[in-house]
Image (tube, grey):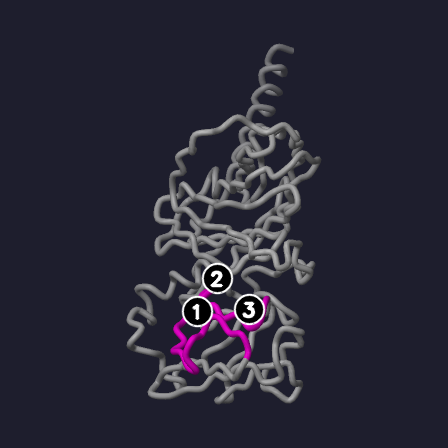
């Protein structure tokens, strides 16, 4: 009898060890908060966590918040070599992207995200999407398959009582500003996109894609890829065509709201013929045709700009694609 008890205990111990090892090696992402109670004016801190047996070279996340209760401030990642890459922000949606030129092993905190509590309210934060990025054999960013999203929301209780004056808390790691767009006319803008953005779809993750261009075939920006060797492509991140990729087989390529364009972006803030991409001297160029066009968050002040792999182009208010 005693021997049977010892054997049963050994089996249970082995099973528990196996389950624990599996839990430690499963690819997963989840959201946590150290506390749920805050006062108006205090900094709300939430943590994005992950476990991955596979070394990663980047990650992205999107977090939904109530702009009447919270204002995003910044995110920071404690992972060595992981750099924040700014994206245009939308009201009510934090869009974070990080990348590293070297593979990193993850088992814990991916990033800490900070908000300012604006007033007394019952609110919460929701992790709408998140992904871990790896580098595929072709040298491009690709989503790590099989990643599970665990706890995806946290509830927050913000007291209307103003918090006492706080000294600035030190922030370590790579800091990513998350400033929301300015409100127009004193109210919340009405063009917030209420769709689930597909991140890293079809092998494109902005964060990893941006830095993977360093030290690879795109090492020197002066040495642009020949159109005859590798076809460039546009990978739509935000807007009506989000998640789709368009290979630039035909140049010049017209982009706009008109269905007769090579790429049709049916967005009210995109004009009929908004922009054109063409090739010259083994490089790629973007020509603004009269719409509001931005490259990496900066308005196109001249009629034509050079496009580099990983550049983020925004047409109008929210139609956004990555060139690569």
Q: Mark 3 packing: few (<14 Cα in 10 Å), some, or many (20+)?
A: many
Q: Secondary structure at mark 1?
A: loop
- Of the numbered discs 1 and 3, the one sitting upstream in the chain is 1
Residue bearing mark 1? 311
Kindly report which numbered mark, 1 or 2, lies closer to the viewer in this rendering. Answer: 1
Q: Which residues are magenta?
A: 291-317
Residue closer to the observer: 167 or 238: 167
**Taking 316 as reference, is 195 left or right?**
right
* Residue bearing mark 3: 320
Q: Earlier in the sequence, mark 1 or mark 2?
A: 2
> Of the residues under marks 3 and 2, which one precedes in the sequence?
2
Closest to the camera, between mark 3 and mark 2, is 3
| Residue 72 against residue 264 in the figure, above or below | above
Which quadrant holds the C terminus? bottom left
Front one among 273 and 26 = 273
How far across and down, in percent of the image, does residue 141 sit?
46, 62
Q: Position of residue 206 (x, y in %)?
A: 48, 62
Q: Which mark is residue 206?
A: 2
* Residue 301 horizontal side relative to residue 189, left or right: left
Residue 255, given in percent of the width and then of the height, sits at: 56, 82
Q: Is residue 9 above or below residue 143?
A: above
What SS does tag 2 mark? helix
């Amino acid at each position: 009898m005693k021997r049977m008890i010892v054997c049963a205990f050994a089996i249970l111990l082995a099973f528990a060890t196996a389950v624990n090892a599996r839990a430690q090696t499963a690819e997963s992402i989840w959201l946590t908060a150290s506390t749920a109670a805050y006062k108006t004016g205090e900094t709300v801190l939430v943590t994005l966590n992950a476990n991955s047996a596979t070394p990663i070279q980047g990650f992205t996340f999107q977090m939904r918040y109530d702009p009447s209760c919270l204002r995003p401030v910044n995110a920071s990642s404690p992972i060595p070599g992981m750099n924040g890459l700014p994206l245009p922000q939308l009201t009510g949606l934090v869009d974070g992207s990080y990348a590293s030129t070297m593979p990193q092993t993850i088992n814990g905190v991916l990033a800490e995200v900070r908000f300012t509590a604006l007033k007394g309210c019952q609110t919460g934060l929701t992790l709408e999407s998140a992904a871990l990025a790896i580098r595929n054999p072709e040298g491009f960013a690709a989503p790590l398959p099989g990643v599970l999203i665990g706890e995806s929301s946290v509830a927050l209780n913000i007291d209307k009582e103003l918090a006492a004056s706080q000294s600035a808390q030190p922030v370590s790691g790579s800091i990513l500003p998350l400033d929301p767009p300015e409100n127009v006319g004193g109210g919340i803008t009405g063009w917030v996109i209420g769709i689930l953005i597909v991140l890293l779809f079809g092998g494109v993750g902005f964060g990893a894609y941006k830095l993977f261009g360093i030290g690879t075939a795109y090492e020197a920006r002066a040495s642009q890829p020949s159109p005859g060797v590798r076809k460039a492509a546009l990978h739509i991140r935000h807007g009506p065509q989000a998640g789709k990729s368009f290979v630039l087989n035909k140049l010049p390529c017209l982009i706009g709201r008109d269905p007769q364009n090579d790429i049709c972006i049916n967005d009210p803030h995109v004009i009929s013929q908004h922009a054109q991409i063409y090739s010259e001297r083994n490089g790629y160029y973007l020509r603004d045709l009269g719409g509001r066009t931005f490259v990496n968050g900066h308005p196109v002040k001249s009629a034509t700009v050079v496009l580099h792999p990983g550049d983020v182009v925004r047409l109008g208010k929210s139609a956004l694609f990555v060139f690569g």
